[in-house]
Image: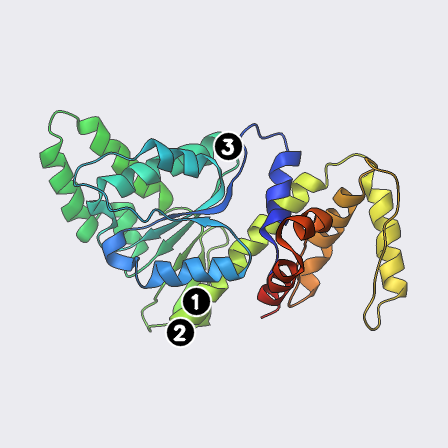
Amino acid sequence: MARDADAVRHSSSSSGSTKRRMYHVFLSFRREDTRTSFTDHLYAALKRKGLKAFRDKEELERGESIKPSLQQAIEESHCAIVVLSPSYASSTWCLDELQKILQLREESSLQVFPIFYGVDPSDVRKQEGSFAEALKKHEERFLKDKMKVQKWRDALEKVATISCWDSNDSNGHDIFMSRKKSHIFVLCRHETEFIESIAKEVMSKLLDESLSDLGMLIGIEPKLDELESIVARESEGVGFIGIWGTGGLGKTTLARVFYERTCKNFEIHCLIHNIREAYEKDGLISLQRKLLFFSR
């Protein structure tokens, strides 16, 4: 399954949000734990879905606070994936990121997806194991700012209560855990499949958000119903649909909303808009490569 990133990004410009969304996903992770393994593979899986993910590649000087550019990237993202690994809490940068992410979850529409990678969710919630050791060191370091460490503790406790993914259960299976429904679903045994299931779920969540925003457009439902009835009558074989009309009538918006509603029914799908401009700017080969990328 694949799709163009512009389709989801379009929803943010048509919604009531005053902050332009530049990224679909912000990745918060501990570099020494997962940068060249799990997180790198997750980033690639999200990219294959057509999602634009932000991951910071710069090394952080010991003790440095979260940079303004990272705060801005979080604010400009549709959702955040927090990869909670054994040494996550040892990084003040990661803890500041987490605090900012949860703040935006409360204040705006930022969706948050925790992944417990090699750690027990209860250790995060209760601050036990490696999390207890890390926070103890922070308390010794920030003796004059105990509130800072307490805010980090509160953030860890809060993120552990959000619907999440846990990389392993007691039998070594990869699982998806939904705390809201109190169910645990065994998905697969291999990390590659686990990562693919995460990317697929995030894609679905963002698509639902996009549909919710686009569905609020006035007067579009009757046009969608008419378009869907045409497609239903011509459901066999390869089909082409042309939408004609003068400029400013909403042809592009109608096509985008229709794509959002129907793309779930296809294994492979792609939305390319402004073809004339793209052709004049980058040429035909660039458009062909884009189609081939989403058809792999």
Q: Residue 286, can we see it?
A: yes
Q: Left or right: where does residue 222 sit relative to residue 44?
A: right
Q: Dividing the image into 4 quarters, which one contains the C terminus?
A: bottom right
CB atoms of marks 2 and 1 within 8 Å? yes
Tell which circle, 2 or 3, labels the residue nearer the N-terminal end. Answer: 3
CB atoms of marks 3 and 1 within 8 Å? no
Q: Given the image, on which type of amino acid does mark 1 rest? A: Phe
* Mark carried by residue 194: 1
Q: Given the image, on which type of amino acid does mark 3 rest? A: Ser
Residue 35 percent coordinates (x, y): 30, 57
Q: Which residue lies at the image location 34% right of the left edge and 67% below the top edge?
A: 169
Residue 284 percent coordinates (x, y): 67, 59
* Mark carried by residue 190: 2
Q: Which residue lies at the image location 67% right of the left edge and 46% below the top edge?
A: 211
Residue 50 percent coordinates (x, y): 55, 56
Badge 3 element: loop
Viewer-closest of 5 and 291: 291
Find the distance from the CA under tag 2 to the CA under tag 3.
Answer: 35 Å
Q: Can you identify the residue that label 3 sits on?
A: 108
Q: Which residue lies at the image location 27% right of the left edge and 51% below the top edge?
A: 30
Q: Left or right: where does residue 179 sit relative to residue 145?
A: right
Find the distance from the CA under tag 3 to the CA under tag 1.
Answer: 29 Å
Badge 1 element: helix
Q: Given the image, on which type of amino acid does mark 2 rest? A: His
